[in-house]
């Protein structure tokens, strides 16, 4: 549920080409639909209706089946994510040491809720199941950068690293 | 082959990668080059040592010195002092290994490692998982060779049965029996699958095994395939585990190159091939039929059993599906025998179990202990107890499907039956320690919100029931709970667990039932007194100034984001409860402990 939900689809020819190559690579494999959707999500960053249609036609399965799989798994998103994807681990180990407060602080600082992204498409905020780095609890990541053992007061400082570029 | 005088083992598991071990590694190698030691000292990137709270971790052999929380800037000192001059850098040693008389204690004598027995984790933190030769050097693929060249499939099944190994994914079904069912099932094609979709938030042993010892899983799956007559396998692993996926792929490629996967393995006529399938985030895929449907590329919805997957599983064919940790035990059982394995543990639960110890405990990390150990030994001796002088409250095992274990049951020997008897379950092995600052109504709500989101929606008791249950808990934590809500909550729990289709629904109410059972007073305080004794549920909290302690320094009024604290210099301050947003900044900043929450 991105705040900018109505943003138009901006897929390129190159992306389309890449997707069709991925479909060709997997098509003969047993149970290929999931790997293909995973590739599609990697190429486009999310799974809008246009991409679902391409997968449906390329794989020869109904659009409803593609939509069913896309909406079943939490990895797939119908809306785009921000340039900086903030992921807050909400696993039990992080939760008992205050991940809830950290999420609240991010929501306050960014003015968006869990699962949304800012209007300028810069930041998106998502709670994750468990990243398995329980020794660093509470832990968050911004794209590839991991921040461990953080407290809510550090949130503005972390955001600052990404605000200027 | 180069002979090295020192080996530097650097943990490269997810925990240590997140704490920056790559930067340490780069700095270390640069230092080695600087002093010209790169041909004498070998740096090995291993899997998880277990003590994740102290990462990045480095162990230097032959001395066995365990350096904790190493930073890139420490590398020069370690290289100069330890490797060049032979002086151990005491200030960086894990404090438990520092010992007055002898200078350094061995790791196996520290509280964290003393009571551990490593079977499934034996190679984690020991070998380089990206080099198949290191695995082979530690008896790797010997068990597969033995099975293929000296044993019949039935003999393999008999050993696994006799060992008493039970499924480590949670339910504890006897592994040998599962293999036997699949072996006896009719089918032109059979499959072996590994469940590495570790969904329990706070459990990470399967990931650590795949990262630290991927060949053990490949070898075990090949053995299972030989036993049941399969020639194709799948490892279903969480996409959120990129390092594990990467190392597993390397391991599969190396095994193929060595002829340990593929056609005619060990010249026995046995073929086996293995593929990785990525999960996409669905807790319900821990349920066998759901996981198999997901590998087939569908929505991972469970179905009623029978038929069991051993008879009708993946693509409708007989399938064995085991958890990663279960598999990691197999090669050792084949080599050391069923008697060795069954000599560990309790009457009905044999061997060891890996727990992911987390939450409010000093030594967060992975521990592998013999079944039958008590919770007290794990939390207090291995875990080092609750930090910051807080009081222990309960430990949660089994994640969102399990329950909590309070102090009174702390001396119960841990096995499948005993954990179930006290209202929890073994589960995959997450073990989260909660202290006095954790509210048990809030925790129950946390787990339930998880299940609500992860319920696949196929059956109504789970889909609607968990939602209603979560609403009741929301009512209680927000101060609107009525006494009859507690009865309703109990009744709903019973209905959901009795009528749900799969284990997700059947166990969804476990956290609520057990937390209510052991911490009834806390629930009642929320409902009758509108108070949260742990001070977590915001709607029930008040921040107040203790007049006797306030000296009127005005700091609280300055930091309050909504300006709801009033008072002049050297006068007692007052918090306007109507305006207060309960952010707690005032209490955090007060230097005189003059603000409390109640």
Image (spheres, helix red, strand yellow):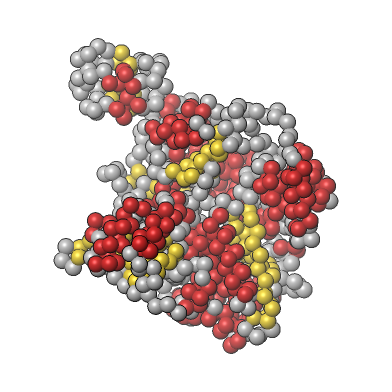
Left or right: where B331 falls relative to B307? left
- At 60% from the left and 68% from the top, the residue drawn is B252
Quadrant in the rendering for residue A83 = top right
The image shows residue B291, relative to residue B521, as above or below, that is below
* Quarter occupied by the C terminus of chain B: top left
- At 70% from the left and 54% from the top, the residue drawn is A35
The image shows residue B427, relative to residue B148, as above or below, that is above
Left or right: where B451 falls relative to A53? left
* Residue B257 spot, x, y in % from top left: 62, 75
* Residue B368 spot, x, y in % from top left: 41, 64
- Residue, far top: B568
* Residue B236 spot, x, y in % from top left: 62, 59
- At 77% from the left and 73% from the top, the residue drawn is B188
The answer to which of B561 and B397 lies nearer the viewer is B561
* Residue A90 spot, x, y in % from top left: 49, 42
Left or right: where B262 falls relative to B71? right
- Residue, far left: B101
Badge count: 0
Residue A21 visible in the picture: yes
The answer to which of B363 and B254 lies nearer the viewer is B254
- At 31% from the left and 48% from the top, the residue drawn is B386
* Quarter occupied by the N terminus of chain B: bottom left
Residue B164 visible in the picture: no
């Amino acid at each position: 549920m991105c705040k900018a939900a109505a943003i138009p689809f901006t897929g390129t020819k190159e992306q389309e080409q890449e997707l069709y190559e991925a479909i060709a690579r997997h098509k003969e494999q047993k149970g290929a639909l999931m790997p293909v959707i995973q590739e599609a999500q990697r190429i486009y960053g999310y799974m809008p209706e246009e991409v679902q249609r391409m997968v449906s036609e390329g794989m020869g399965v109904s659009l409803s089946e593609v939509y069913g799989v896309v909406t079943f798994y939490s990895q797939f998103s119908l809306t785009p994510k921000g340039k900086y994807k903030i992921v807050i681990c909400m696993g039990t180990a992080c939760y008992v040491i205050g991940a809830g407060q950290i999420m609240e602080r991010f929501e306050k600082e960014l003015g968006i809720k869990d699962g949304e992204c800012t209007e300028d498409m810069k930041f998106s905020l998502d709670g994750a199941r468990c990243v398995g780095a329980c020794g660093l609890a509470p832990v968050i990541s911004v794209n590839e950068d991991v921040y461990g053992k953080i407290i809510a007061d550090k949130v503005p400082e972390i955001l600052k690293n990404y605000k200027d570029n | 082959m180069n002979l090295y005088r020192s080996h530097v083992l650097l943990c490269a598991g997810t925990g240590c990668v997140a704490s920056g071990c790559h930067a340490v590694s780069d700095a270390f190698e640069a230092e080695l080059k600087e002093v010209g030691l790169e041909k004498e000292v070998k740096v090995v990137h291993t899997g998880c040592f277990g003590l994740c709270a102290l990462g990045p971790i480095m162990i230097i052999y032959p001395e066995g010195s365990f350096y904790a929380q190493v930073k890139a800037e420490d590398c020069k000192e370690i290289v100069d002092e330890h490797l060049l001059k032979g002086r151990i850098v005491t200030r960086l040693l894990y404090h438990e290994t520092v010992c007055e008389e002898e200078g350094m204690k061995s790791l196996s004598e520290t509280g964290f490692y003393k009571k551990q027995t490593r079977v499934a984790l034996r190679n984690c933190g020991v070998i380089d998982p990206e080099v198949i030769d290191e695995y082979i050097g530690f008896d790797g693929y010997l068990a597969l060779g033995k099975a293929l060249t000296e044993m019949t499939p039935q003999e393999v099944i008999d050993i696994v049965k006799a060992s008493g190994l039970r499924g480590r994914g949670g339910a504890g079904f006897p592994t040998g029996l599962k293999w036997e069912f699949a072996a006896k099932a009719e089918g032109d094609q059979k499959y072996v699958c590994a469940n590495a979709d570790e969904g329990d938030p706070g459990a990470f042993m399967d990931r650590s095994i795949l990262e630290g010892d991927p060949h053990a899983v490949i070898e075990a799956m090949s053995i299972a395939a030989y036993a049941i007559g399969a020639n194709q396998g799948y490892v279903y692993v969480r996409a959120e585990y990129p390092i594990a996926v990467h190392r597993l792929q390397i391991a599969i490629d190396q095994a193929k190159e060595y002829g340990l996967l593929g056609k005619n393995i060990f010249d026995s006529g046995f073929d086996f091939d293995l593929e990785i399938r990525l999960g996409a985030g669905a807790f319900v895929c821990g349920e066998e039929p759901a996981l198999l449907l997901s590998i087939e590329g569908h929505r991972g919805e469970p179905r009623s059993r029978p038929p069991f997957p051993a008879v009708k599983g993946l693509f409708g064919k007989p399938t064995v599906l085991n958890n990663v940790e279960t598999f990691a035990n197999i090669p050792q059982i084949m080599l050391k025998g069923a008697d060795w394995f069954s000599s560990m543990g309790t009457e009905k639960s044999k061997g060891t179990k890996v727990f992911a110890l987390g939450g409010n405990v000093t030594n967060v990390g992975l521990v592998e202990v013999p079944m039958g150990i008590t919770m007290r030994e794990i939390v207090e001796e291995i875990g080092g107890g609750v930090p910051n002088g807080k009081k222990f409250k309960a430990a949660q095992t089994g994640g969102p499907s399990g329950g909590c274990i309070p102090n009174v049951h702390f001396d119960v020997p841990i096995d499948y039956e005993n954990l179930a008897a006290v209202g929890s379950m073994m589960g995959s092995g997450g073990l989260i320690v909660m202290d006095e600052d954790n509210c048990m109504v809030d925790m129950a709500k946390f787990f339930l919100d998880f299940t609500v989101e992860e319920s696949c929606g196929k059956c109504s008791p789970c889909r609607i029931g968990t939602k209603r249950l979560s609403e009741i808990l929301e009512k209680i934590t927000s101060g609107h709970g009525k006494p009859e809500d507690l009865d309703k909550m109990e009744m709903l729990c019973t209905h959901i667990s009795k009528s749900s289709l799969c284990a997700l629904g059947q166990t969804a109410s476990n956290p609520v039932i057990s937390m209510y059972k052991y911490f009834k007073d806390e629930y009642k305080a929320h409902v009758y007194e509108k108070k949260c004794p742990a001070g977590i549920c915001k709607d029930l909290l008040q921040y107040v100034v203790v007049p006797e302690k306030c000296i009127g320094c005005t700091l609280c009024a300055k930091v309050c984001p909504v300006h709801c604290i009033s008072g002049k210099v050297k006068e007692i301050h007052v918090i306007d409860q109507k305006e207060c947003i309960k952010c707690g900044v005032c209490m955090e900043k007060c230097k005189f402990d003059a603000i409390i929450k109640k």
